[in-house]
Image (tube, rainbow, N blue to C red):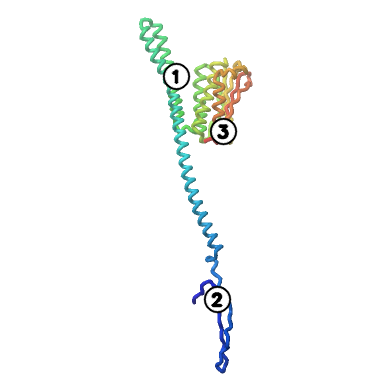
Amino acid sequence: MTFASPDNYKFHVRACNEDGKWSESDAVFAVHVLPPFWRTWPFITASAIFLLGMIVASVYFISTQRLHRQLEGLRQQEALEKERARIARDLHDQLGANLTQVALLGEMAETDKDSPTEVEAHAKQISQTARETTHALDEIVWTVNPSNDTLDGLINYVCKYAQEFLAMADLRYRLEVPSQLPATPISPELRHNVFLAAKESVNNVVKHARATSAWLRLQLEPHQFTLEIEDNGRGIAPADEKKGRSGLRNMRKRMEDIGGKFEMTVGAEGGTKVRLTAPLNSR
């Protein structure tokens, strides 16, 4: 069975009677054969547009994914360069200065070798500087280790630092931190800035507060955490922050850089309470 091609046709019919006589003219029937729907111009046009759209969408998707990969690579490279610069700065500022001081003290001890009292004093200073250098190196190693990019890693290290520093200053202290902390991932930048802000707060308690007791508390919420460092010292005057004393401006800037918040208020016993609030979704 065959089908006629789509077109206009005329069907001619001629009749013959029983005497064998044919009609003088043909009977004509006009026939219009429609094409199947897949051969119609609307369908062809729609198919062409759809195919063109698929090609454009595919090219756009592939190009966008490639661009995203390139941007991600650039961001990672930028983050790596930034981290390298920070490590170099920390090594220079902390270890470089300490090692220079050790060298100078050694030269002074050599010069004063005929004075046992001076040599003993220089030796004590060298020992103290060496301990400080060890602590500084430990902080740098902890900071660059990616396995510490968790909330529990940060809080445990802050507590360890606070315990050692406050104990050396002969201050009573209390840590109010949950025994079990979630291993929530955090960014290296957040971990670094929160630790330095907390470290500065603890240093201020020892150096400036004239306190006898200190407290460190952690308040954990679903999308953020707050670290409180409080003391029972003399408090801090409103003009102190304006003067930039004790690194308060740097602490505020560090917390703002990670989308957090720095607050300093009067403590329950009249001392100073520092609140460091940081988000948990900044990784």
- Three-letter residue code for mark 1: Glu
> Which disc, if any, is residue 69?
none
Q: Which residue is mark 1?
A: 132
Is the residue 141 above or below the residue 208 in the image? below
Q: Does the residue at mark 2 contact the one at mark 1 (Cβ under 8 Å)?
A: no
> Which disc, if any, is residue 279?
3
Q: Residue furthest top?
A: 114
Q: Residues within 10 Å of mark 3 (few under 14, many from 20)?
A: some
- Residue drawn at the location 48% of the way across and 33% of the way down: 149
Q: Residues within 10 Å of mark 2 (few under 14, many from 20)?
A: few
- The spot of residue 48 in percent (x, y) is 52, 59
Q: Residue furthest bottom?
A: 19
Is the residue 98 above or below the residue 79 in the image? above
Decide which of tag 2 and tag 3 comes sooner along the chain.
Answer: 2
Q: CA distance from mark 3 to mark 1?
A: 31 Å
- Residue drawn at the location 57% of the way across and 19% of the way down: 244
Q: CA distance from mark 2 to mark 1?
A: 104 Å
Decide which of tag 2 and tag 1 comes sooner along the chain.
Answer: 2
Q: CA distance from mark 2 to mark 3?
A: 79 Å
Query: In the image, which is nearer the foreground, mark 2 or mark 3?
Result: 2
Q: Nearer the viewer, residue 16 or 192?
A: 16
Q: Which residue is mark 2?
A: 9
- Three-letter residue code for mark 3: Pro
- Three-letter residue code for mark 2: Tyr
Q: Does the residue at mark 2 contact the one at mark 3 (Cβ under 8 Å)?
A: no
Q: Nearer the viewer, residue 240 or 182?
A: 240
- The spot of residue 203 in percent (x, y) is 53, 19
Q: How many marks?
A: 3
